[in-house]
Image (cartoon, grey):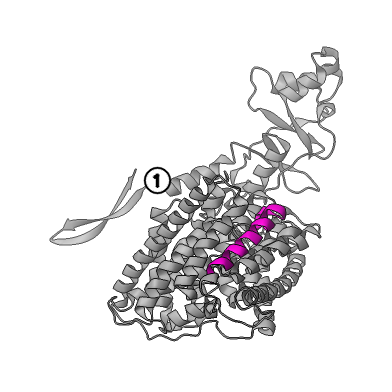
Amino acid sequence: MSIALHKRDFSINARLPLIFLLAACIGAVSTLAAYVLLNLIRLFTNLFFFGAFSFADRSPAQNHLGLWVVVIPVVGGVIVGLMARYGSDKIRGHGIPEAIEAILFGKSKMSPKVAILKPLSSGIVIGSGGPFGAEGPIIMTGGALGSLIAQCVKVTAAERKTLLVAGAAAGMTAVFGTPVAAALLAVELLLFEWRPRSFLPVAVACAVAGFARAIFFGTGPLFPLETAAPGGWALLSCVIAGLLCGALASGLSAALYKIEDLFSELPIHWMWWPALGGIVVGIGGFVEPRALGVGYDVIGDLLHQHIALQIALALLVVKAIMWVIALGSGTSGGVLAPLLMLGAGLGTVLGPILPGHQPALWPLVCMAATLGATLGAPLTAIVFAFGLTHDSNALLPLLTATLVAHGFATVVMRRSIMTEKIARRGYHIYREYGVDPLERHYVDEVMTQTVESIDAATSIADTLATYFGAAQKRRAYPVVRDGAVIGMVDRGLLERYVHGDAALARDVSVVEALPKGDPLLALPEETCRLVATRLAVHNVERLPVVVDRTSRRLIGIVSRSDLIKPSLLHFEEEHKRERFRRVVPAMGKRRFAPVRKTG
């Protein structure tokens, strides 16, 4: 049995070691950026709420400002609004949609302004009580750093995208200590492909950030937790929790963009919107101080059941209102930490009433399910929750509830909270992954092998009469000299060359009409996708297929119509319904009988 050596599971990329090296550097730089961002948040929290120039980790809930707490988020909103208008409006929002837009529609180019202003603005907003997390800003900041480093090196747009995502994922790793979840986030939300050329450098950056994180933040999970192994009733509880988390995610997404629409109708410049959102944040912070700021301490207390049911319910309502209005106002902040808190709050409320009598499990499960349904990234949410807690007993409930929530959200919502904003700017993003049929098949599988060629010594007149006369069989023919292909000719090319000059057509060989330079060729071991791209780039209909570029011995022709064949096969796989077995009664028993039915 002969094996086609040119057919591989994955494509070869000789530049991968260089991209690995750049990704490792970006992972280290993004970790440093995460350290700077978290310290900026602490600094501004101390300045705004305690009047102290300090980097101590203090919660804004400990403030003693009384009613003055309402003013603090407004001041932060004014500052950030000015920064966005006169600095860069790219700092508005929670960062991930902006990174996706740069990846898909901006050739992964981001400006130095974003790398500087995004962490600064987020530090001000969160430090002044904004109900956001640091992960969205660090994803945007790390992505900007990755893009800037890539712009200093001669790389393709695809390689620049990989390095941008490497910075984003490394930043998330540095904040939460979840490198595997960060790599999955890259796959599910940012890369828009599953290839070693992109996934491996991102994973390298996450690994470097994971090790470097120990220098700045120490080791161990952010919210260590250990729950009991789930019992049989937990399956029903997971389904109920998943449906409710999916409903929560859908409601939050719909409310966010409704609020955004309401802000857009205001008769004032968008620069002032964050200040208006700050009023709501301030009032919410006065009513429920623990809803202010990042709230990692609150998430930990919810997971460990250190918050009473009534307080958890109040936190859930106040945090949701504050977060939706503040983010809808166009300020700078993240979504992961608020979603974690809202999901954990829902789990705390549901814990006592769900079947199975395991109230400690459900804050964690609902946290992951709400996150996965909102982002449209269920695998990321599952691994993320495990990475935050290292609770292996919760893996099965996490899997079940998160997938139920994700399924609910995909049915109810047309787009996720991440892609809706981009769609409103006129760009549609299709997030389903599948192997391109043209990538799965090679030229030697679809080419026409019976080929008629033209000898290079033939005149143009004889060529037109013999090959392009009344008995013409093909639209174009390869031209061969001493067994090697030197080009392709068609009727239009020959007629344009001679311009009706009969004498010129008789005296000049067909070679003179060929375009100058090396001929366009296809090789049997090339993928249909690569050849389709070559046809599109050079605006030609077909290419001669040769054994190799040295001998250029002709073995076939591949045309655009040939490249349709893989798509037709793919269509049949997707839409042609077949049944090969059915159960039929026989002698009082049932047996399988072969049948083939298509439709």
> Is residue 77 a member of the stretch shown in magenta?
yes
487, above or below 221, in the image: above
The residues colored magenta run 69-91
Residue lying furthest left: 588
Q: Residue type at mark 1?
A: Lys
Work out which quarter of the rendered image holds the N terminus and state it: bottom right
Residue 209 visible: yes
Crowding at dot 1, Cα within 10 Å, few <14 / some 14-19 / many 20+, comes out as few
Name the residue located 60 percent from the left edge and 61 percent from the top edge: 77
The dominant secondary structure in magenta is helix
150, above or below 349, in the image: above
Q: Secondary structure at mark 1?
A: loop
Residue 217: x and y in percent read 64, 83
Name the residue located 39 percent from the left edge and 66 percent from the top edge: 245
Residue 98 quadrant: bottom right
Residue on which disc 1 sits: 576
Residue 85: x and y in percent read 68, 52
Work out which quarter of the rendered image holds the C terminus and state it: top left
Residue 586: x and y in percent read 16, 58
Q: Nearer the viewer, residue 277 or 238?
A: 277
Residue 316: x and y in percent read 41, 70
